[in-house]
């Protein structure tokens, strides 16, 4: 993967190092949740001040459980739609395409800002059927590079909470209007109180309290699943954190602190079942 690279990103973009660090810690755990060896390879080839990421280790299972749940849904969808397209905006340094596999006869598109793509390029293999694109998820121009007729799965992880309601609505409306073959949209949201806490700490975060709101924005979307990350406390291998998550799950505000939503994207006439 070449020489060690120095990381020079903006404050928000630097957050992509946090889940990478969490995955490295997980891989070295005796009971890994994700077991992502690619994260170890990538972090070893980055010149990073580990003090910038070490402080996030306590909440790492929010990241790991979220990623594992999304991986399982993406893996199942790809198996059912080998001709489909997976679009992963805000991919950062994540190796999901390598962990779950690219659609056999379809396409996988990873998207992130130009500076992130420049850092990522060459750090991770790019298998057949994979495309890495530089751009912003809110910029309509790059969507033209994604096939519109095939079933599509759009996955946004750790991204939409930084866009705000208008930004998220714009992306969802574009997806719902463009893709005629149906599919799914999966993204995580945080509770409003988490968004307020993030903004108080200087992060441009926004919460979503009503998980049905995207359905009202886009009649083509149908909520089919809402996963509470904290509510999945039984999957946490370390007992102290498992107990903490269990306690938090009793309080509705804690249980809904981070959720992953899965929406069905209704295609136009002729779209197959489930997609």
Image (cartoon, grey):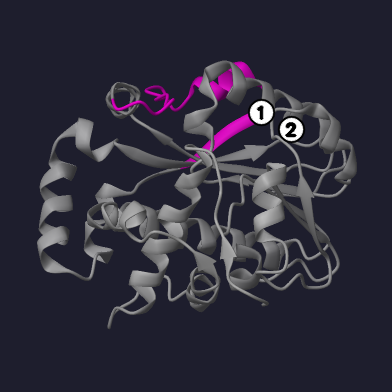
Q: Nearer the viewer, residue 97 or 175?
A: 97
Q: Nearer the viewer, residue 47 or 125?
A: 47
> What is the number of the mark on residue 70?
none
Residue 199 within the magenta-colored segment of the rendering:
no
Q: Residue at x 44, y 28 (%)?
A: 211
Hey, which quadrant is residue 130 in on the image? bottom right
Image coords of residue 153 (percent x, y): 69, 49
Which residue range is magenta in the image?
Answer: 201-225
Classify mark 2: helix, strand or loop. Answer: helix
Q: Residue at x 72, y 68 (%)?
A: 122
Quadrant of the frame with the N terminus: bottom right
Q: Is residue 33 visible?
A: no
Residue 216 within the magenta-colored segment of the rendering:
yes
Residue bearing the label numbered 1: 172
Tag 1 and tag 2, C-beta contact below 8 Å? yes
> In screen coordinates, is 203 left or right of 42?
left
Q: Residue at x 39, y 29 (%)?
A: 203
Dot 2 alpha-carbon crowd within 10 angstroms: few under 14, some 14 to 19, many 20 or more: many
Q: Is residue 108 visible?
A: yes
Q: Residue at x 52, y 46 (%)?
A: 157
Image coords of residue 187 (percent x, y): 53, 41
Residue bearing the label numbered 2: 175
């Amino acid at each position: 993967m070449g020489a060690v690279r120095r990381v020079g990103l903006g404050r928000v973009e630097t957050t992509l190092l946090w889940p990478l660090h969490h995955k490295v810690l997980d891989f070295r755990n005796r009971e890994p949740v994700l077991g992502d060896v690619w994260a170890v390879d990538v972090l070893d080839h980055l010149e990073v001040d580990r003090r910038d990421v070490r402080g996030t280790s306590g909440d790492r299972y929010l990241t790991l459980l979220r990623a594992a749940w999304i991986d399982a849904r993406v893996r199942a969808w790809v198996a059912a739609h080998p001709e489909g397209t997976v679009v992963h905006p805000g991919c950062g340094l994540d190796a999901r395409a390598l962990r779950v596999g690219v659609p056999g006869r379809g396409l996988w598109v990873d998207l992130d800002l130009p500076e992130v793509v420049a850092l990522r390029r060459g750090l991770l293999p790019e298998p057949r059927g994979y495309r890495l694109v530089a751009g912003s998820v809110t910029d309509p121009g790059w969507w033209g590079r994604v096939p519109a007729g095939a079933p599509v799965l759009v996955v946004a992880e750790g991204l939409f909470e930084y866009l705000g309601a208008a930004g998220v609505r714009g992306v969802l409306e574009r997806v719902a209007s463009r893709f005629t073959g149906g599919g799914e949209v999966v993204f995580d949201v945080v509770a409003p109180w988490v968004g307020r806490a993030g903004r108080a700490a200087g992060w441009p975060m926004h919460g979503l309290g009503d998980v049905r709101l995207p359905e009202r924005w886009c009649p083509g979307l149908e909520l089919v699943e809402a996963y509470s990350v904290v509510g999945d406390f039984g999957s946490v291998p370390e007992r102290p954190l498992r107990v903490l998550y269990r306690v938090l799950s009793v309080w509705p505000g804690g249980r809904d602190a981070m959720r992953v939503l899965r929406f069905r994207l209704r295609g136009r006439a002729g779209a197959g079942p489930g997609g």
